[in-house]
C-alpha cells in the first residue's frame, strides 16, 4: 500500500491563521468529506478532553422536581431524565467513558494484532501456523457473543471491559498486517537488507512496519467506530459499565421505559452514538483517500 | 521490397503539445512533423521521456483532453483531421483503421477472457459477420501469425500462453480488421531475444503483405534497423533526425543520433568505456579518447567462487498432506568457476534458471544438491561476515529501494549491522559512496522516487559497495534502463571493477552487453549450461545449437 503523509497534513493545518497558510494546498489534498470528518473529530476530541468545563450540571445529581424537562427549557440544554439529571452533562460523561474505553482497547488491539501479523508474515513455519489457527478460532465465534460470555464471567468495570475488548478484537489488525507484510517481506529491498545482514527486527521496524502504516491508520479509525458500538452494546445489556455510571449504553437502557413520555432521553444517547460512529468512519475514509492521493508518486 | 505509393496515411504537421499541471506546464512535443505513407514501416526511436509515446498516443487522441494543450499543429489520419472528430468517430477509427500493439501483452489482454472471445469481440464489433464466420477468420489470423496449433491458442486463456505467443495474439488482433495503420509501442521489449526476432520478422512480413503502415516506437536502434524503412530520432520532444533507416544509422548527422549509436555496446571493443550521451554531446572528443583506453583487469587467476554440480528444484505438485511429490528443476547440475577480478556472465532467456542460480549464490535460496564454494570453502560454513562480501544488485532499482527511506539511509543500511554509527557518520559515508558511484552528494536526503532509473541503479550499486564486497551479483542491472543510461552504468561497473578488483557475476539476456563486459560466459538453456568459455570465443564462434540461434536472433545495426 501507499505511503501516508500525516505529518504533511498536520503541517498544512498547523499553518492555519498564519501567512503561510495555503488554501490551495489544502484544497489539493482535502475534499469536503475530509474537512467535515476532521472538523467533527476535532469537536468530539474537544468535548472529551475539556468535558468538565462545558458541563452545565453535575451529571450524577438529580432534581426530582424537574423530571422529564424537554430540551432547551429550564437550563437543561438537552432536557433531563427520569431522575431530573441533566442529559447534556451525562452525554459528555458518556463520551469521555466511551472514548477512553475505545481508545485504550484500540491501542491494545493495534499492538497485539500488528505484532502477531508481523511475526506470522515474516516466514513460513510453526509460528505462522499457530498464529493463524488462533485467528481462525477467534473468528469462528461471533464477536459480541464471545464478549458477552467473557464479561459475564469477569464482571463489570472499566478495566475489565477494556481488557476484554482489547484482548479479543485484534483479529482485523492481524489479518491486514499479515496480508500486507507478507508481500513486503518479499520485496527486493527487504532481501537486499537481509543480504547485508540487517537483523530481523530492524527489517520489521525499519522496512515492513512503515509500509503497512497507512493501512493501520485507516483500520484504527474504522475499528474505533466498531469498538464504540461494542462498548455501548455491552453497557446497554448491563454488562459493560457498572449500573448508574452515565454511559451512552446505560442511558439508552434507562430510556426504554420512558420512550413515549420523554423521547429525548432516547434520542440524545442514540444520536451521540450515531454521530461518534459516523465521524470515525468518515475519518477512516478521509485517511484512506488522503493516503491514496499522497501515495501515488511513491506507490510501490 | 514492394512499391510504396505516395498516399499518406498519417500526416502530422508542426505539432506541439503541453501537459498542464499545477506545478507548471511541461512542453512534451515541440513542433513535431511526421509523415507515414501507405505500406511503410516507420520507427520513432528515443529514450524514455523523449516524447515518442506521447506522439503515438496523440495520433489516436488517447490523451485526456483536459490535461493537455496543443498550441500549434495539426494531425490528419487518413486525410481526416482527428482533432475535429467526435468520440464516436474516433472509436470507429481506432478499432477499424488504426490498431495498437502494446509492450506488455499480458496486461493488454484481458486475463479472464479466452483468446477467442477477445478476437471475436473485435471482429463482431467492426465487421458485419456471424459468430461462425468470426471463428473462421480468427483461426485463419492466428495461422497467419505462424502459430502451429491455432485451435489450441484460440481456446486458451492469456495466462496459458507464453509471452511470445501472447504477442502473436496481440498482433493477430491488431491485423484482424485489416487496419490502415498499426501503432506498435515497444512491441518486443518484454520478450526474449530469440522470440523478439521471430515477432519482428512476422510483423514485417504481415505488414508488407497487407500493405499496412506501421508506426514502431522503440528505444532500440537495432530493432529499428531490422524492421523500419524510415526512422525518426526523437530527443527532448523534437525530431532531431529523420530519414531512410540505412542512411540514419550508417551516417548519422545529428550529434544526438551519433551519441545514441556510440552508447551501444555493439561493435565496441570489449571492456572499453562506452561514450555516454553527455560525453558525445559536449564534444569532449579529446577526453573521450583518453577515457577510451582499454581498462585492463588484473591478471591474478585466483578462484573466488565455484559452483559444483549445483541443482535447484522447486516443488511443483503436492499430495494431500502438503508434502511435495514432484519437482520442477530450475537449475540442473551446473558447474562453473569464477575468478577474482573477472566478470562471469550468465546468458539465457527468461525462465532458464539464471536468477535462481544467482539467488542461491547470495543465499536467498538454497541448492537442493551440489555445493557453492566461496574462497575455497563451502559457503554455508563461511561466517556471516565473509558471506557479506557477496552482494547483489537487482534488475529493477524501483523495487529494490525502500520508497520511504532517504538515500543516505538506504546506502548505509548495511553498515548499521551490529554497529551503532551516528547518523552524522552515516551521512558522511553516504556522501563518499555517492561520489564513488557518480551521484551528487547533496541529494542524499531525497527519496528514491525523486531520481531517474539510472540514478536509482547507482544508489543500489552504492548500497552494495558500502560493505566493501569482493563479489557482486548483478541480476540484469541494465535491462530496465535506457541505452544511454545503460552505457553509463556499464562504464561505472568497469571503473569500479578496476578500482576495487571486484568480481562480477553478471546475469543478462542481452548478448551485446555481455560481450562488452564479460571475460567468461556461460549460456544457459532450459536449466542447463549448454556452453561455457571465454566470452569472445563463445559469442563469436558458438558451438551449441541454442547459442547459434541466440546469436543469430540478436538484432543488429546491420540493415542488410
Image: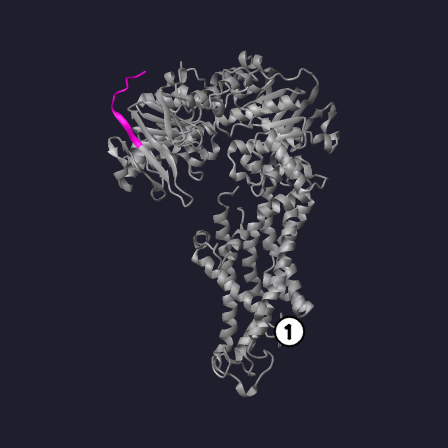
- Please say if A201 is above or below A38: above
Q: Is residue A179 at all visible to an observer of this figure?
A: no
Q: Nearer the viewer, residue A98 or B342?
A: B342
Please tell me in which quadrant of the rendered image residue B105 appears.
Answer: top left
Q: Nearer the viewer, residue A298 or A107?
A: A298
Q: Position of residue A82 (x, y in %)?
A: 54, 82
Q: Name the residue located 55 percent from the left edge and 34 percent from the top edge.
A: B456
Q: Nearer the viewer, residue A238 or B277?
A: B277
Q: Secondary structure at mark 1?
A: loop
- Please say if A65 is above or below A58: below
Q: Which residues are magenta?
A: B1-14
Any magenta on residue B10? yes
Q: Is residue B222 left or right of residue B518?
A: left
Any magenta on residue B215? no
Q: Position of residue B34 (x, y in %)?
A: 31, 27
What colour scheme was applied to this rendering of the protein?
Answer: one colour
Q: Is residue A275 left or right of residue B84?
A: right
Q: Position of residue A131 (x, y in %)?
A: 66, 50
- Please say if A140 is above or below B266: below
Q: Nearer the viewer, residue A11 or B325?
A: A11
Q: Is residue B161 left or right of residue B291?
A: left
Q: Name the residue located 28 percent from the left edge and 27 percent from the top edge.
A: B9
Disc 1 packing (10 Å; few <14; some 14–19; many ≥20): some
Q: Which residue is mark 1?
A: A242
Tally of numbered discs: 1
Q: Position of residue B260 (x, y in %)?
A: 45, 22
Query: In which chain is the residue bearing label 1?
Result: A
Amino acid at each position: 500500500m501507499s505511503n501516508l503523509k500525516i505529518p504533511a497534513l498536520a503541517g498544512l493545518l498547523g499553518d492555519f491563521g498564519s501567512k503561510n497558510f495555503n488554501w490551495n494546498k489544502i484544497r489539493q489534498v482535502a475534499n469536503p468529506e475530509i474537512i467535515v470528518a476532521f472538523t467533527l473529530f476535532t469537536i468530539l476530541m474537544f468535548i472529551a478532553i475539556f468535558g468538565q468545563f462545558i458541563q452545565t450540571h453535575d451529571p450524577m445529581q438529580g432534581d426530582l422536581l424537574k423530571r422529564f424537562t424537554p430540551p432547551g427549557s429550564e437550563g437543561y440544554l438537552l432536557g433531563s431524565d427520569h431522575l431530573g439529571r441533566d442529559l447534556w452533562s451525562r452525554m459528555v460523561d458518556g463520551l469521555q467513558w466511551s472514548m477512553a474505553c475505545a481508545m485504550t482497547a484500540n491501542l491494545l488491539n493495534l499492538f497485539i494484532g500488528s505484532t502477531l501479523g508481523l511475526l506470522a508474515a515474516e516466514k513460513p513455519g510453526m509460528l505462522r501456523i499457530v498464529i493463524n489457527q488462533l485467528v481462525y478460532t477467534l473468528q469462528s465465534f461471533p464477536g459480541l457473543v464471545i464478549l458477552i460470555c467473557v464479561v459475564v464471567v469477569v464482571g463489570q468495570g472499566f478495566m475489565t471491559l477494556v481488557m476484554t475488548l482489547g484482548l479479543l478484537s485484534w483479529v482485523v489488525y492481524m489479518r491486514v498486517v499479515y496480508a500486507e507484510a507478507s508481500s513486503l517481506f518479499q520485496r527486493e529491498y527487504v532481501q537486499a537488507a537481509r543480504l547485508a545482514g540487517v537483523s530481523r527486527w530492524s527489517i520489521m521496524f525499519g522496512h515492513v512496519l512503515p509500509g503497512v502504516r497507512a493501512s493501520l491508520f485507516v483500520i484504527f479509525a474504522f475499528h474505533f467506530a466498531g469498538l464504540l458500538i461494542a462498548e455501548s452494546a455491552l453497557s446497554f445489556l448491563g454488562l459493560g459499565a457498572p449500573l448508574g455510571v452515565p454511559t451512552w449504553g446505560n442511558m439508552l437502557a434507562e430510556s426504554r421505559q420512558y420512550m413515549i413520555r420523554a423521547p429525548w432521553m432516547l434520542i440524545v444517547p442514540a444520536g451521540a452514538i450515531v454521530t461518534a460512529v459516523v465521524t470515525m468512519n468518515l475519518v477512516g475514509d478521509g485517511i484512506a483517500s488522503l493516503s491514496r492521493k499522497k501515495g501515488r508518486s511513491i506507490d510501490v | 521490397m514492394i512499391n510504396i505509393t505516395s498516399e499518406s496515411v498519417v500526416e502530422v504537421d508542426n505539432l506541439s503539445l503541453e501537459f498542464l499541471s499545477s506545478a507548471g506546464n511541461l512542453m512534451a512535443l515541440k513542433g513535431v512533423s511526421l509523415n507515414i505513407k501507405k505500406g511503410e514501416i516507420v520507427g520513432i526511436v528515443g529514450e524514455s521521456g523523449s516524447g515518442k509515446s506521447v506522439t503515438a498516443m496523440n495520433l489516436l487522441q488517447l490523451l485526456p483532453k483536459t490535461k493537455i494543450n496543443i498550441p500549434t499543429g495539426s494531425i490528419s489520419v487518413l486525410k481526416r483531421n482527428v482533432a475535429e472528430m467526435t468520440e464516436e468517430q474516433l472509436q470507429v477509427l481506432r478499432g477499424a483503421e488504426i490498431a495498437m500493439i502494446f509492450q506488455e501483452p499480458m496486461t493488454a489482454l484481458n486475463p479472464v477472457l479466452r483468446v477467442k472471445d477477445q478476437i471475436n469481440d473485435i471482429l463482431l464489433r467492426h465487421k458485419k459477420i456471424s459468430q461462425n464466420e468470426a471463428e473462421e477468420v480468427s483461426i485463419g489470423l492466428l495461422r497467419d501469425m505462424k502459430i502451429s496449433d491455432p485451435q489450441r491458442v484460440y481456446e486458451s486463456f492469456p495466462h496459458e500462453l507464453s509471452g511470445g505467443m501472447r504477442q502473436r495474439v496481440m498482433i493477430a488482433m491488431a491485423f484482424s480488421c485489416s487496419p490502415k495503420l498499426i501503432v506498435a509501442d515497444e512491441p518486443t521489449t518484454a520478450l526474449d531475444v530469440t522470440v523478439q526476432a521471430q515477432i519482428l520478422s512476422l510483423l514485417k512480413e504481415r505488414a508488407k503483405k497487407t500493405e499496412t503502415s506501421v508506426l514502431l516506437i522503440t528505444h532500440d536502434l537495432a530493432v529499428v534497423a531490422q524492421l523500419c524503412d524510415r526512422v525518426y530520432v526523437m530527443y527532448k520532444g523534437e525530431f532531431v533526425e529523420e530519414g531512410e533507416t540505412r542512411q540514419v544509422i550508417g551516417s548519422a548527422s545529428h550529434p544526438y543520433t551519433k551519441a545514441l549509436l556510440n552508447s551501444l555496446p555493439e561493435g565496441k571493443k570489449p571492456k572499453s568505456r562506452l561514450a555516454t550521451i553527455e560525453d558525445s554531446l559536449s564534444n569532449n572528443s579529446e577526453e573521450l579518447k583518453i577515457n577510451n583506453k582499454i581498462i585492463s583487469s588484473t591478471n591474478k587467476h585466483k578462484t573466488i567462487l565455484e559452483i559444483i554440480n549445483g541443482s535447484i528444484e522447486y516443488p511443483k505438485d503436492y499430495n494431500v498432506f502438503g508434502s511435495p511429490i514432484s519437482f520442477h528443476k530450475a537449475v540442473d547440475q551446473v558447474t562453473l568457476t569464477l575468478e577474482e577480478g573477472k566478470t562471469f556472465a550468465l546468458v539465457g532467456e527468461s525462465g532458464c534458471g539464471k536468477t535462481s542460480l544467482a539467488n542461491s549464490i547470495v543465499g536467498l535460496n538454497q541448492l537442493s544438491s551440489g555445493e557453492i564454494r566461496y574462497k575455497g570453502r563451502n559457503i554455508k560454513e563461511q561466517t556471516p561476515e565473509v558471506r557479506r562480501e557477496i552482494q547483489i544488485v537487482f534488475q529493477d532499482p524501483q523495487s529494490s529501494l525502500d520508497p520511504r527511506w532517504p538515500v543516505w539511509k538506504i546506502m548505509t543500511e548495511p553498515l548499521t549491522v551490529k554497529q551503532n554509527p551516528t547518523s552524522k557518520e552515516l551521512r558522511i559515508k553516504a556522501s563518499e559512496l555517492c561520489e564513488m558511484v557518480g551521484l551528487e552528494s547533496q541529494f542524499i536526503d531525497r527519496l528514491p522516487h525523486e531520481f531517474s532509473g539510472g540514478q536509482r541503479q547507482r544508489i543500489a550499486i552504492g548500497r552494495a559497495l558500502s560493505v566493501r564486497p569482493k563479489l557482486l551479483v548483478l541480476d540484469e542491472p541494465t535491462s530496465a534502463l535506457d541505452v544511454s543510461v545503460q552505457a553509463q552504468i556499464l562504464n561505472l561497473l568497469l571503473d569500479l571493477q578496476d578500482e576495487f578488483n571486484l568480481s562480477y557475476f553478471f546475469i543478462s539476456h542481452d548478448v551485446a552487453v555481455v560481450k562488452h563486459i564479460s571475460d567468461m560466459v556461460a549460456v544457459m538453456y532450459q536449466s542447463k549450461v549448454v556452453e561455457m568459455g571465454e566470452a569472445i570465443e563463445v559469442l563469436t564462434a558458438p558451438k551449441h545449437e541454442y547459442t547459434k540461434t541466440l546469436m543469430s536472433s540478436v538484432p543488429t545495426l546491420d540493415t542488410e
